[in-house]
Amino acid sequence: MRSSAASGPTTLRMIHGLRLTASCLVATFTLAGVAGCGGSDATQPVAGEPVGLEELSRSASTSAEARSGRFSFSMTMSLPGAEEQFAFTGEGAFDAASDRASFSMDMASFARLLGGFVAGLAGPNAEDLPDFDDPSGWQIDAVQAGTVSYVRFPAVADRLPAGKSWIRTDGKADVQGLDLDQIATSDPRTLLDLLKAASAEIETLGSEELHGVDTTHYRALIDPREYATLAPTEKRAELFSLVEQMGAQSGLATVPVDVWLDSQGLVRKLSLEISATKPGSSESSDASIAFELWDYGEDVEIALPPASQVVDASAIRSQSS
């Protein structure tokens, strides 16, 4: 029988639920990561020149298929009733040769906002709450190695055996309601798929240097319905239904996206700014997302956590049963 701290809507389940709410807001406008299309051997766009829809789609595929590189990401969001914005920021690297990727994410701002909300819902489980005001507890690290992931989440360190700071999971990690795989397998590179659903004419806005590389800044409109058509056949009906709900709830039919391409057609930066107001309401939800890529093709070394600091997720689950 599970302990009372692990039953019902525990604190960690609330954290996970709100994290999914944030993810779903982004996914609602982007549907990123659900569909995809192959690359192409056609000529890539040249920086400074106008690009078409097919060229932009090829840039997305080529960038996503890069063998190695580094990236950073940030997201801010304001919601009706919240006194301040919350944010995620992070950075990481990927290396196809070793089949590894890593990222670090700062969720301290989100934790502060979350603390007041969760405290009012926790009820008798209030003592099980992590410290939402300790920024160090919300600096999350993750390493992916093939199908295995490792997560370090200081806010839940007191649930781990002595001397352990990393949790190993192979796709079935639900530790007291916290879906570690949802965290460990998050990959902001899926945002590149947005570019495959661009519609209408693409604007050329100018040039900019990013991480020492000359780029051209473009702006396009993303059509969620078009993106749904790229999904596997068995998922299209579900996605079209989601798109319809999205339009009804947000009032948005298209989403503007800015993208910076280098002379090889590689995506160096992608950003979105969204302001959505539900029909019949005067309150809006605002979100901004930025994602940068650099060091394409450079040597990237991604180390696994020391074995002495790792505990398997299954061992933690058995402790809470």
Image (cartoon, grey):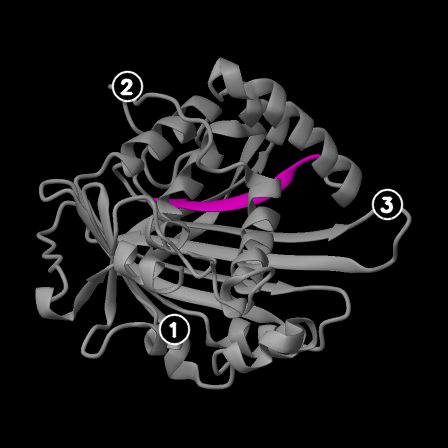
Name the secondary structure under disc 2: loop
Question: Going 56% across and 43% down the picture, which residue do you hit?
Answer: 27
Q: In the displayed image of the protein, which residue is found farthest to the right? A: 280
Whether residue 44 is visible: yes
Badge 2: how crowded within 10 Å, few (<14), some, or many (20+)?
A: few
- In primary-sequence order, the first of circles 3 and 1 is 1
Q: 198 or 182: nearer the eye? A: 182
| Cα–Cα span, label 3 and label 1 | 40 Å
Name the secondary structure under disc 3: loop
Magenta region: which residues? 253-261
Residue 268 image position (x, y, % from top left): 33, 49
Residue annotated with mark 3: 279
Question: Going 61% across and 41% down the picture, which residue do you hit?
Answer: 28
Q: Is residue 220 left or right of residue 269?
A: right
- Mark 3 or mark 1, whichever is nearer to me: 1
Q: Amino acid at mark 3?
A: Pro
- Mark 2 or mark 3, whichever is nearer to me: 3
Residue annotated with mark 1: 156
What quarter of the picture does the C terminus occupy?
bottom left
Residue 18 image position (x, y, % from top left): 59, 60
- In primary-sequence order, the first of circles 2 and 1 is 2
Q: 181 or 296: nearer the eye? A: 181
Q: Is residue 65 left or right of residue 201?
A: left
Question: Going 58% across and 70% down the picture, which residue do you hit?
Answer: 86
- Look at the numbered discs 3 and 1 and tell me whether their residues touch, using CB distance below 8 Å: no
| Cα–Cα span, label 2 and label 1 | 49 Å
- Determine the main secondary structure of the stretch shown in magenta: strand
Residue 235 part of the magenta segment = no
- In primary-sequence order, the first of circles 2 and 3 is 2
Residue annotated with mark 2: 42
Whether residue 213 is visible: no
